[in-house]
Image (cartoon, helix red, strand yellow):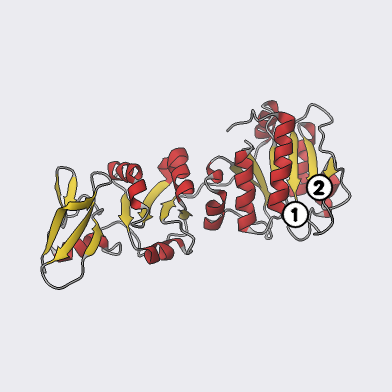
């Protein structure tokens, strides 16, 4: 059944636009986002605007599962792809590493605010779609998608080299090391605090308990992961010991540490935070130069590790000054 495209009702974001269309029959009004492969024979382009005039063309343009669009079936991402949710995190990825962007999806409520992203996607001939919120949930695997999802190529996590460490120390950069932080949301919150205070080097152990960045981590970090470089080391205690020539290693202990956070020499600080339940492992504690403990009222046993990270990273920034940048 043919559809009449009502140009006057289009919600213009860029060269490819949303059109409110009405069928000639009794079908309900349908909002479609014409954002398919520009080479598709089903779509006619006029003055930079994609226009479809037949119902099957509109359905093909709207349905992300159609074969003419280079997109996988909704809800099925490649194991080599990462989904980033939320407008702040998505914009951060476009600003910091647009080369990794592969596909963009958003709902109608978010569409008016992402015209610049759509223009960039169209220029690069990459797929972008306005879809229903339930489809965003399938794509992201979460109800907490924030109205927008970008599918990207994940970054490779490598081990730092001795030259890296010397260079970081020469620049006075604070290092943040996480000993088996297991919760991906805690990891995201810690990364957000690190980015806020200008700490751009995060080192994780290659350990089964240690969380690695996931979609949830990116969402909670609110773009912080695009400003923090993540590294992974095989033997955590040995690596921490090797930092001693260039760094003052300070471990955060639940109890028994010094309440004062002081730098006793000119070396920059490497801050080590422990697992949510177990704290610092014994072999990690042994290689720390000093321990610090945040004293509380005693009414609750401890702070969440992400809160501890925020407090101690602020102390690091106070000691070093907010001069660190990526």
Q: Residue at x 47, y 64 (%)?
A: 141
The correct choice, above or below, for 22 with respect to 239 in the image is below
Circles 1, 2 touching at the beta carbon (< 8 Å): yes
In the displayed structure, does residue 307 sit left or right of residue 151?
right
Q: List x then y, in percent, for residue 176.
A: 69, 42
Q: Quadrant of residue 23?
A: bottom left
Q: List x then y, in percent, for residue 138.
A: 42, 66
Badge 2 density bin: few <14, some 14–19, many ≥20, Cα 10 Å: some
The correct choice, above or below, for 200 with respect to 276 in the image is above
Q: In the rendered structure, which disc, 1 or 2, sits on the residue that comes first in sequence?
A: 2
| 256 vs 271, nearest the viewer | 256
Q: List x then y, in percent, for residue 247.
A: 76, 34
Q: Residue at x 61, y 40 (%)?
A: 196
Residue most extreme to the bottom:
26
Q: Quadrant of residue 55?
A: bottom left
**Residue 294 - label:** 2
Q: How many marks?
A: 2
In the displayed structure, does residue 113 sit left or right of residue 46?
right
Residue most extreme to the right:
256
How far, Cα to Cα, is label 1 from label 2? 9 Å
Q: Secondary structure at mark 1?
A: loop
In the displayed structure, does residue 17 sit left or right of residue 210?
left
Q: Which residue is mark 1?
A: 303
Tell me the quadrant of the picture where the C terminus can be found: top right
Q: Determine if residue 277 is in view.
A: yes
The correct choice, above or below, for 200 with respect to 144 in the image is above
């Amino acid at each position: 059944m043919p559809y009449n495209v009502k140009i006057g009702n289009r919600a213009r974001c860029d060269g490819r636009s949303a059109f409110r269309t009405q069928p000639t029959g009794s079908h309900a009004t349908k909002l479609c986002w014409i954002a398919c492969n520009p080479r598709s024979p089903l779509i006619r382009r006029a003055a930079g605007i994609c226009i479809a005039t037949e119902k099957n063309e509109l359905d093909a343009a709207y349905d992300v599962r159609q074969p003419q669009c280079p997109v996988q079936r909704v809800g099925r991402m490649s194991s080599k792809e990462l989904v980033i949710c939320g407008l702040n995190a998505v914009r951060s990825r476009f600003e910091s590493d647009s080369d990794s962007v592969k596909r963009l999806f958003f709902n109608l409520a978010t569409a008016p605010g992402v015209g610049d992203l759509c223009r960039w996607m169209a220029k690069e001939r990459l797929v972008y779609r306005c879809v229903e919120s339930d489809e965003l949930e399938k794509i992201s695997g979460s109800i907490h998608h924030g109205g927008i999802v970008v599918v990207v190529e994940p970054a490779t996590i490598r081990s730092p080299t001795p030259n890296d460490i010397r260079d970081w120390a020469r620049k006075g950069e604070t290092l943040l090391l996480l000993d088996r932080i297991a919760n991906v949301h805690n990891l995201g919150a810690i990364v957000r605090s690190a980015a806020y205070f200008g700490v751009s080097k995060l080192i994780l152990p290659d350990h089964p308990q240690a969380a690695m960045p996931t979609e949830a981590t990116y969402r909670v970090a609110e773009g912080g992961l695009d400003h923090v470089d993540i590294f992974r080391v095989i033997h955590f205690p040995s690596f921490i010991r090797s930092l001693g020539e260039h760094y003052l290693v300070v471990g955060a202990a639940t109890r028994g540490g010094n309440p004062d956070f002081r730098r006793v020499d000119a070396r920059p600080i490497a801050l080590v935070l422990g697992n949510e339940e177990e704290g610092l492992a014994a072999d990690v504690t042994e290689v720390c130069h000093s321990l610090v403990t945040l004293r509380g009222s005693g009414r609750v046993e401890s702070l969440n590790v992400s809160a501890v990270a925020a407090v101690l990273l602020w102390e690091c920034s106070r000691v070093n000054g907010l001069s660190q940048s990526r």
